[in-house]
Amino acid sequence: MLRRLAAGAFWKFSRWKLVTQPAPNRPTVLIGAPHTSNWDFVLMLSIAWTQQIEVHWLGKHSLFKGWRNPIMRGLGGIPVDRSDPSRIVAEVIERVHAGEVFGLVVTPDGTRGGHTHWKSGFYRIAQKTGMPVTLGYVDRTTMTTGLGPTIDISGDISADMDRVRAFYADKSGIRPEKQVVPRLREETELDG
């Protein structure tokens, strides 16, 4: 109740407008893109709280140090040790297979710049758990944010990512110069 009230207050006073499709009615991997600013986190929480989606999100382990740890975990955070990214994928798959129900927010374009490809963890998690992928977005040009379509992963990486690229083609992050085109390294390897 308090979360929904806080989100309502945010939308009332924010320049951003929430434009969203209905929230998925099953556990989903929720992409947050383009991820170019720390404000994306506030927008993501406001969307989730408005839509009453129980979410967990992946964040670099340094965000969970000291006094921030209980706050970040209370907001649904799961720390990621970047030295072993495959471990977090395995942990999330294990939690889903154990019966936990939640939406998992992933920012596959990484740490707001400096990357040439999206990270593929979201795709592997969706594929191995059977969870669909919901395309959450930020669009600075229209000052809108929300949830786009929910898609099922087919296993054809290029075809699936073509659908993702088509959706994000007209979306611009808060800092567009830090934006990464939705392309997985695995696609380049397939093309190579």
Image (cartoon, rainbow, N blue to C red):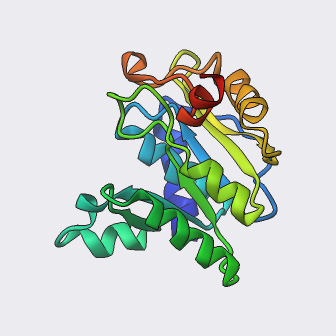
- Quadrant in the picture for the C terminus: top right
Q: Is 154 placed left or right of 138 in the picture?
A: right
Q: Is 105 placed left or right of 160 in the picture?
A: left
- Residue at 27% from the left image edge and 66% from the top image edge: 64
Q: Is 142 placed left or right of 178 in the picture?
A: right
Q: Quadrant of residue 168?
A: top right
Please count the marks in the image.
Answer: 0
- Quadrant in the picture for the N terminus: bottom right
| Residue 5 x, y percent position in the rendering | 54, 60
Q: Is 92 placed left or right of 84 in the picture?
A: right
| Residue 158 x, y percent position in the rendering | 72, 30
| Residue 81 x, y percent position in the rendering | 32, 62
Residue lying at the far left in this picture: please name it.
Answer: 66
The answer to whether residue 187 is above or below residue 28 is above
Depth check: 135 or 10 in front? 135
| Residue 70 x, y percent position in the rendering | 31, 76
